Image: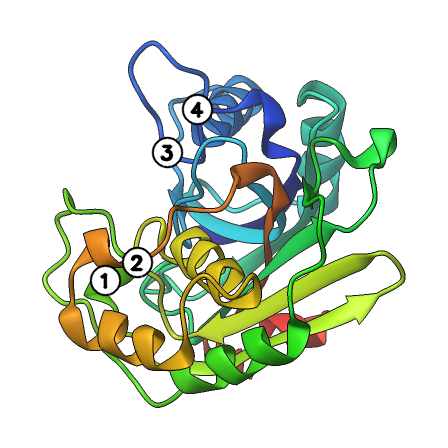
Amino acid sequence: MRYFIEISYNGKNYHGWQVQPDATSVQEVLEKSLSTLLRKEIKVTGAGRTDTGVHAKQLFAHFDTEPLADASVLQFRLNSLLPKDISVKNILEVNEEAHARFDALEREYKYVINLEKDPFSIDLAYFVHQKPSVALMNQAAKILLDYNDFQCFSRSRTDVKTYYCNINKASWEEVDQQLIFTIAADRFLRNMVRAIVGTLLEIGFEKITLEDFHNILKSRDRSKAGASASAQGLFLTRVRYPNSIFINEPINESLGQ
């Protein structure tokens, strides 16, 4: 039987989602906990990979096991066993062919910037000493929707076959003393969001122009774009799936279409 597990986590203490040699990852911790409780080796496949220090408010992974009599019992036991910075939100039965990565219709990220020094969000936001131009950054963010090749924002060493992504939302908003960037697409390249944010900040600080931004996108050259923004401000906030993969109607609207 295949199940989707919905989790959230604070990424401060982890070297990203994916299992790595000699480094603690969220995937590794989750697999060990599931294997302990289900008394057999359990492997999970995630909706995507987050980098070291990046957080997730909603991430899905799938795993296979014998039918669960009551998934809520496993959820409770997992939350008791997992460290405090990882939380299980749901365990949902899905079709045998359902895939946490390939069936995802849309992924949404948010990047949080503090405009004033805040000791209580050191690990959850990126602090800037001066306020960039939100208007300029929003003009640039809108330009992203006119392109679909984002090689200029991808890590140079990657195993992807295509750099094409369909971005359907990209905008900044100012809330209290924070700037929040929201971006949604069918897929993202490794390091893509942080590279976009870093480049948009250069526009906001008027280090490069909107015309430069067009040229960066057309160049397909990572060295032309800005430096990647710090990891701690980035959150994977939503992953959307078609309702058809779930055995029962999704209990959370954000899971389905």
Type of the residue with mark 4: Glu
Q: CA distance from mark 2 to mark 3?
A: 26 Å
- Nearer mark to the viewer, of 4 and 1: 1
Q: CA distance from mark 1 to mark 2?
A: 6 Å
> Dot 2 surroundings within 10 Å: few (below 14), some, or many (20 or more)?
many
Label pair 4/3, CB-CB below 8 angstroms: no
Give above or below for 74 relative to 24.
Answer: below
Q: Residue at x 40, y 66 (%)?
A: 208
Q: Residue furthest right?
A: 176
Type of the residue with mark 2: Ala
Give above or below for 2 relative to 163.
Answer: above
> Dot 1 surroundings within 10 Å: few (below 14), some, or many (20 or more)?
many
Please name the residue that numbered disc 2 is placed on. Answer: 225
Type of the residue with mark 3: Gln
Q: Residue at x 41, y 74 (%)?
A: 209
Which one is earlier in the sequence, the residue at label 4 or at label 3?
Answer: 3
Dot 1: what SS? Answer: helix
Dot 3: what SS? Answer: loop
Q: Residue at x 66, y 23 (%)?
A: 82
Q: Would you say 155 lies left or right of 244 here? A: left
Label pair 2/3, CB-CB below 8 angstroms: no
